[in-house]
Amino acid sequence: MKFGEAIRNFSGGRALIGQCPEARLPVPVYETAFALSKWLEENGDRQSATITVVSPTSIRSEFEDDNMATTLSEAMEKQHIEYLPNFPISRIGSNAIETAGGHELDYSLLMLLPPFRGSSAISRLGITNEEGYVNADWTMKVIGIDRVYAVGDCVNFAGPKMGHMAVHQGEVAAASLVAEIAGHEPVSHYHHDVTMVLDAGDRESIYFHKDLWADDPASIRHGRFWSWAKRIHEKYWEATHA
Ligand SMILES: Cc1cc2nc3c(=O)[nH]c(=O)nc-3n(C[C@H](O)[C@H](O)[C@H](O)COP(=O)(O)OP(=O)(O)OC[C@H]3O[C@@H](n4cnc5c(N)ncnc54)[C@H](O)[C@@H]3O)c2cc1C
């Protein structure tokens, strides 16, 4: 059954949404929880549904920021979304999930992001870390092998893995490749930061920006403007990359 169909058929009980250990993709989890809460309010019976978000770690470690932990926890509380941190799922049953420590949680509807890994095809080249992600420097050149560049989810950089990072890395890798072919030093450098707008229900949205290679605190903003700005940016992006 497709997820949309499963949601339409969901008639109460617990909707369990979360990440398996090492999933590295928190944003869709929280957005799905907020979107489901809103959808149930408008089309279903929100009162008879419990929405629970589980995380193998915590919001603080997912976004590497304390303020985001407070902001997101408050937004979930406002929408009556339960949050269970430090719930590393080790077993999935037909109506319950379980941790290795024996904690169990039942569900009627389940959406889980699986663990992420690097590609097994390159695992024997000696260029990956223990999770199979490719070691690259900030010109996107692969460490330990000549004339090879890597970009995107496969690269061994800390923090969440996101599309805008992959695109930026692609631009840097292309410039580095051109420089290498021309016999110059690389001039373009990747900078690892996360920028996102998280729709938090009730037309509320959270803007988050953090430099993942610096200790500076994140920049966080709230308000309806950011949701609107996200839609405009999406249209601009589609138009310029079609
Ligand atoms: C549910 C979900 C929601 C997300 N939401 C957001 C978001 O809101 N914002 C955001 O910035 N990011 C988001 N992301 C993350 C974003 O999609 C990824 O970071 C981005 O797509 C990574 O780009 P990539 O090119 O590295 O990998 P991919 O986009 O995964 O592309 C890899 C391609 O390689 C192909 N491939 C794999 N193995 C092989 C093989 N052996 N041979 C040939 N081809 C192969 C795959 O089929 C795929 O087409 C989301 C991801 C998911 C799963």
Image: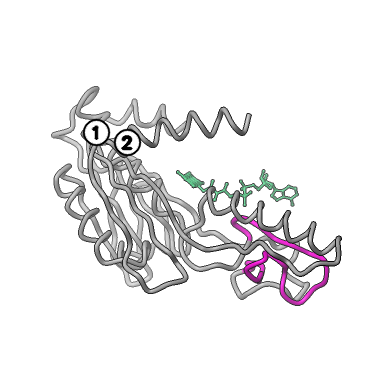
Q: CA distance from mark 1 to mark 2?
A: 7 Å
Which x, y percent locates residue 228?
Answer: 33, 32
Give the mark nearest the N terminus, 1 or 2.
1
Which x, y percent locates residue 76?
Answer: 20, 48
The residue located at (60%, 49%) in the rendering is 167
- Vertically, is 222 above or below 130? above
In the rendered structure, find residue 203 and report the number of the disc placed on it: 1
- The answer to which quarter of the image holds residue 8 is top left
Which x, y percent locates residue 163?
Answer: 54, 48
Q: Inspect the image, locate mark 2, and give the three-letter code of the amino acid beneath it.
A: Ser
User: Which one is in front, 169 or 153?
Assistant: 169
The residue located at (22%, 55%) in the rendering is 71
Q: Inspect the image, locate mark 1, and give the three-letter code of the amino acid beneath it.
A: Arg
Q: Which residues are magenta?
A: 132-154
Asked if disc 1 and disc 2 are in contact, CB closer than 8 Å, the reply is yes
Q: Is mark 2 within 8 Å of ligand 1?
A: no
SS of the residue under disc 2: helix
Q: Residues within 10 Å of mark 1 (few under 14, many from 20)?
A: few
Quadrant of the image containing the C terminus: top right
Q: Name the residue carrying label 2.
A: 227
The answer to whether 17 appears left or right of 165 in the picture is left
